[in-house]
Image (cartoon, rainbow, N blue to C red):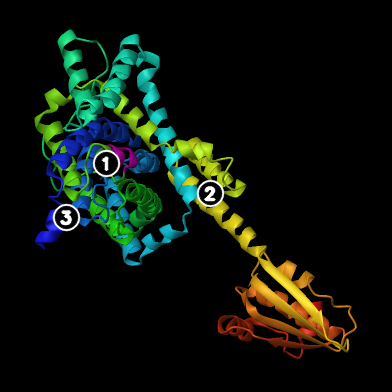
Amino acid sequence: MTTYLKQHWFSNLRGDVLAAIVVALALIPEAIAFSIIAGVDPKVGLYASFCIAVITAFAGGRPGMISAATGAMALLMVTLVRDHGLEYLLAATLLTGVLQIIFGLFKLGDLMRFVSRSVVTGFVNALAILIFMAQLPELSGQHGTTLVYGMTALGLAIIYLFPYITKAIPSPLVCIVVLTSLAVYFGFDIRTVADMGELPDSLPIFLWPDVPLTWNTLIIILPYALALAVVGILESLMTATIVDDLTDTSSDKNRECVGQGVANIGSGLIGGMAGCAMIGQSIINVKSGGRTRLSTLLAGVFLLIMVVFLDAWVGLIPMAALVAIMIMVSIGTFSWGSVKDLRKNPKSSSVVMIATVLVTVFTHNLAYGVLVGVLFSALFFASKVGKILYIGSTLSADGHQRQYQVVGQVFFTSAEQFVAAFDFKEAVEKVRIDLSRAHFWDITAISSLDKVVIKFRREGTEVELIGLNEASATLVDKFGVHNRPDAVEKLMGH
């Protein structure tokens, strides 16, 4: 127990504390912004971010990852809040948590192994673009003054140059302190955190959603809860995979599903909205030195302390400082090597990556982008594997028997190629088909085998199948029809 606590909680005290401060400061404007997107009071997002971060620190499967209220989840709540109000959102948040726990118990986290590297790269690049685009309103329009540009540029200079002086203090934290000090001392008239929305002035309390416990309520919230659960798990597992790569450590994806579910239930019970892992804040945490569960816990605790007890000071932070940090995250998140690799990588991998980026950026929905990427990956993989099929043949010395040798995988994409490889018009008495180095995967493959056998028999040729492995033989016994008396009639449509 002592070893576990030291490794997962107290092995990186100074780095975790400093990183948590930076993350907490970065969470405040985002939580407020996401609350505004969802159409609820800012404290709904702030309470959610506090609760989700604290609970996932204990229950999550990825140390050092930050979970809170997110934009992807907020977008899914807009219609529910508009049509039915906050109480139904809280009920949907509770149901979201229950569904995510079920996902984890059924080990749906294991499905991440079906997500290809190209999809993960596309996800990362799309998220980097979305993070950068989210900063543009602060740099343009009514907030886009020369002063804001100058402050942002200074913030970026501090972030990238300060580590050359010392790495003892995270440069994003130095950026926030310096820019805030300058803004206050010189009285700069620029947008601050206080301008984002009113910060809460009290601690959260227990709130049971004030909705009727009826089937009608369930019918209203279930579609939203299901969408929130899927998007939340997807984004959390993808973020966990990225943090795994950044830290060269592994994580428990199924535990992460359960942890996210427990966190969302907790959020719903204190008046918070549903949330999930945040790749931007997770990268800030890692790059600022956060590694253990303590950094996640303290990020949530510091967030609550700042918005409730230090709101006057936090409100003075210029948005330019936080914009500089998020631009740093965007630049650091984007996989610049993937652009150079477009020419070197297989075209199919590049198409998957680009499709994931485009769909995610244009829909602003990470789930859609990943879904399209996984679908393309599956299609390209099936096409590649379907081509790995070789069928050769030899004729006996007397010319009365031909033996075919099948090597490879037979399934829906290669079934047509399998049938086309046989010469049904050849005048031989017997055909032997050696399947010892082949595997039949689905009913389409079994149907193609039926066609081959029946077509040969229709021409008066005796057919013998040899070498079927046990799995393929089981499928043939269950779904094959070539040994049934009416097989020819069925094949010919009579």
Which region of the structure is painted magenta? Answer: 278-284
Check disc 2: other Cα within 10 Å, few if <14, some if 14-19, many if 20+: many
Q: Earlier in the sequence, mark 2 or mark 1?
A: 1
Q: Say the numbered circle drawn on residue 372.
A: 2
Q: Report if the CB atoms under discs 2 and 3 are less than 8 Å apart.
A: no
Q: Say the numbered circle drawn on residue 353.
A: none
Q: Is residue 219 above or below residue 50?
A: below
Please provide percent x and percent y for residue 392. 75, 74
Say which residue appears at 34% left-offset and 37% top-offset: 38
Q: Is residue 479 visible?
A: yes
Q: Quadrant of residue 47?
A: top left
Q: CA distance from mark 2 to mark 1?
A: 29 Å
Q: CA distance from mark 2 to mark 3?
A: 38 Å
* 408 is within the stretch colored magenta: no
Q: Is residue 139 above or below residue 412?
A: above
Please provide percent x and percent y for residue 79. 40, 41
Which amino acid lies under the numbered mark 2 shown in the image of this protein? Val
Say which residue appears at 73% left-offset and 85% top-offset: 482
Check disc 1: other Cα within 10 Å, few if <14, some if 14-19, many if 20+: many
Q: Say the numbered circle drawn on residue 7.
A: 3
Q: Say the numbered circle drawn on residue 286.
A: 1
